């Protein structure tokens, strides 16, 4: 077993999942604005360290993805954020892309940037305690989209990123997110997502990536958020499995889904159904941002009650960890 594979399994095994707390300051400001909290470095730290000090970190969370600001912060508990996370048994990770920018010659689409100077930045993050990283490519679905240009250029960037990350002794999370925005059908999402993921792995193989030391972070297969033809959750699970079976090489140890705008319970229920029907060798777990944090943030914003906020976060983490083992049920939500 390679060292990278050991890290990946530590993050994903036994129903554990990933807390995606890597919102850039722009996104975090939107989240905090929505609950009328000022987006200052202090407030961003206060909310995030409340989650990192929760009991469920030990049993449910295998890894936390951080943003550059957070990995450099010292918590009000007196420890650096990576040390605080490591002490719970979870692995600190870091988002290393610098964001999705307009793609020249296809301006409705995006290309993710961040390769310049990446080798040096990775060294610094490793020293700060990170052992895995994340890079997100975003794709839209439309009549002409995602274009070959977007599919190929983002796959190429994800492969170059992965090579540098593995060279630095860390596990790359490869996140090709096909957005749910639009009127498209679930069938369209299945076709386009399969094409996107397949191309990513073609490039990863060309770039000689050790696939046993990679985590894939894909979207689930859903109809667009403006589609009139939503599909039942059972079909989300079967179509998601169909997509991954045809596009992900067997050597990949695990898949950690993004929630992508699903409600908290919907994201849990779909993960549960995927695991109930999982006839692959892949570990299937979560790497949720909004679906782990939304209710906790809303509650926290009222009076910054730490215990109450942690109870809400603990519940979501526990529900998702059950779902990652196919052991979740609706009844457990209300217990
Ligand atoms: C947590 O949000 C992440 C960062 O987004 P920005 O760089 O735009 O601020 C995002 O990459 C996230 O990790 C994934 O999209 C999954 O989050 P959700 O909320 O979809 O589960």
Image: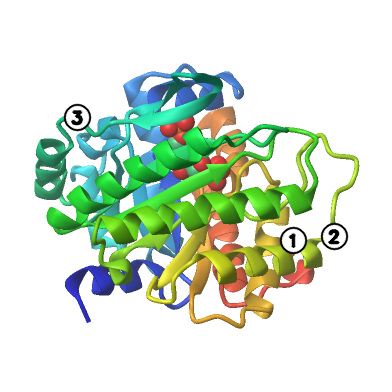
Along the polypeptide, which appears first: circle 3 or circle 1?
A: 3
Rendering coords of residue 53 (x, y %): 36, 52
Tell me whether the residue at label 2 lies in contact with that at label 1, contact meaning CB atoms closer than 8 angstroms: yes
Tell me whether the residue at label 2 lies in contact with that at label 3, contact meaning CB atoms closer than 8 angstroms: no
Along the polypeptide, which appears first: circle 2 or circle 3?
A: 3
In this rendering, the answer to whether 324 lies above or below 37 is below
Q: Quadrant of the C terminus?
A: bottom right
Instruction: Report which residue position mark 2 lands on.
Output: 232
Instruction: Report which residue position mark 1 lands on.
Output: 236
Distance from label 2 to label 3 (Cα)?
43 Å
Rendering coords of residue 157 (x, y %): 33, 40
Q: Quadrant of the N terminus?
A: bottom left
Is 213 in front, or is 18?
213
**Side of 84 relative to 259 (left or right):** left
Q: How many marks?
A: 3
Residue at the extreme right: 228
Distance from label 3 to label 1 (Cα)?
38 Å
- Name the element at disc 3: loop
Q: Name the mark on residue 81.
A: none
Instruction: Report which residue position mark 3 lands on.
Output: 116
- Residue 253, visible in the rendered structure: yes
- The crowding category of the residue bearing disc 2, from other C-alpha atoms within 10 Å (few below 14, some 14 to 19, many at least 20), is few
Is 48 in front, or is 55?
48
Q: Determine which quarter of the picture holds residue 276.
A: bottom right
In this rendering, the answer to whether 92 lies above or below 211 is above
Mark 3 or mark 1, whichever is nearer to me: 3
- The crowding category of the residue bearing disc 1, from other C-alpha atoms within 10 Å (few below 14, some 14 to 19, many at least 20), is many
- Name the element at disc 2: loop
């Amino acid at each position: 077993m390679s060292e990278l594979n050991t890290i990946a399994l530590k993050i994903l095994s036994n129903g554990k999942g990933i807390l995606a707390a890597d919102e850039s300051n722009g996104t975090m400001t939107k989240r905090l604005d929505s609950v009328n909290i000022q987006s200052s470095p202090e407030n961003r730290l206060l909310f995030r360290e409340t989650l990192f000090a929760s009991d469920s970190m030990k049993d449910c969370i295998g890894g936390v993805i951080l943003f550059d600001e957070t990995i450099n912060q010292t918590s009000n508990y007196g420890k650096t954020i990576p040390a605080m996370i490591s002490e719970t048994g979870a692995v600190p990770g870091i988002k290393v892309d610098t964001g999705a920018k307009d793609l020249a010659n296809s301006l409705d689409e995006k290309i993710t940037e961040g390769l310049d100077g990446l080798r040096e930045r990775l060294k610094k993050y490793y020293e700060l305690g990170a052992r895995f990283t994340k890079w997100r490519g975003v794709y839209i679905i439309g009549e002409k989209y995602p274009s070959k240009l977007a599919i190929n250029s983002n796959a190429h960037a994800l492969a170059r990123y992965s090579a540098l990350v593995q060279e630095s002794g860390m596990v790359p999370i490869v996140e090709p997110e096909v957005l749910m925005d639009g009127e498209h059908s679930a069938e369209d999402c299945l076709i386009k997502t399969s094409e996107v993921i397949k191309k990513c792995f073609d490039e990863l193989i060309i770039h000689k990536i050790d696939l046993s030391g990679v985590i894939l972070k894909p979207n689930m297969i859903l109809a667009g958020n403006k589609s009139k033809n939503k599909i039942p959750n059972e079909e989300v699970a079967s179509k998601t499995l169909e997509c991954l079976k045809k596009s992900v090489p067997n050597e990949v140890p695990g898949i950690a889904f993004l929630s992508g705008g699903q409600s908290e319970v919907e994201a849990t229920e779909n993960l549960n159904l995927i695991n109930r029907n999982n006839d692959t060798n892949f570990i299937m777990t979560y790497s949720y941002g909004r679906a782990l944090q939304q209710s906790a943030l809303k509650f926290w914003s009222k009076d910054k009650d730490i215990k109450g906020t942690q109870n809400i976060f603990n519940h979501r983490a526990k529900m998702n960890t059950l779902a990652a083992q196919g052991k979740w049920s609706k009844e457990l939500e209300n217990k």
